[in-house]
Image (tube, helix red, strand yellow):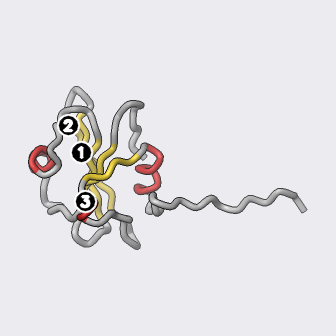
Amino acid sequence: MIPVPSGVRVWLATGTTDMRLGMPGLALRVQEALGRNPHAGDLYVFRGRRGDLIKVLWHDGLGMSLYAKRLERGRFIWPSPADGVVALSAAQLGYLLEGIDWRHPQRTWRPELAG
């Protein structure tokens, strides 16, 4: 899990992104496609065409960081391109990184009685 400081917003770039892009290319995509400042301190999440790889771009005030996660099985849940830019909470980002459907997380059943 990426430690998300309070006050930091998380943005999903809908659609697919060329995962060959590094920090400069993704920062340019944030500026041009999303219309946001990549150095503002927010997290920007991108997904590849196959859906099993995401990259997270974050500028913490000191420098740019790029995180990547690939699922061994399955795909990351992603909104349709028609949704534009989607904002997530830090908890929803945690669900996303674990491969859980962040739109409708399910509580697990817990027994109330022992025995």
Q: In which quarter of the image is residue 55?
A: bottom left
Q: In this view, does 6 lie to the left or right of 48?
A: right
The residues tagged by marks 1 and 2 sit, at their Cα atoms, a distance apart of: 7 Å
Residue at point 24%, 64% (across, down): 82
Q: In which quarter of the image is residue 37?
A: top left
For label 2, count other residues whose C-alpha is less than 10 Å away and answer few (under 14), some (14-19) or many (20+).
some
Residue lying at the far front of the rendered structure:
82
The residues tagged by marks 2 and 3 sit, at their Cα atoms, a distance apart of: 21 Å
Considering the numbered disc 2 on the image, is that residue within a helix, a strand or a loop? strand
Considering the numbered disc 3 on the image, is that residue within a helix, a strand or a loop? loop
Q: What residue type is labelled 2?
A: Met
Residue at point 25%, 59% (across, down): 14
> Relative to 26, does residue 104 appear above or below in the rendering?
below
Q: Horizontal and vertical percent for residue 5?
A: 39, 32
Mark linked to residue 57: 1
Q: Horizontal and vertical percent for residue 22?
A: 14, 51
Residue at point 34%, 48% (across, down): 87
Q: Nearer the viewer, mark 2 or mark 3?
A: 3
Q: What residue type is labelled 1?
A: Leu
For label 3, count other residues whose C-alpha is less than 10 Å away and answer few (under 14), some (14-19) or many (20+).
some
Residue under pointer 3:
14
- Tag 2–tag 3 contact (CB < 8 Å): no
For label 1, count other residues whose C-alpha is less than 10 Å away and answer few (under 14), some (14-19) or many (20+).
many
> Relative to 18, does residue 9 appear above or below in the rendering?
above
- Tag 1–tag 2 contact (CB < 8 Å): yes
Q: Horizontal and vertical percent for residue 109?
A: 70, 62
Considering the numbered disc 1 on the image, is that residue within a helix, a strand or a loop? strand
Precedes in sequence: disc 2 or disc 3 = 3
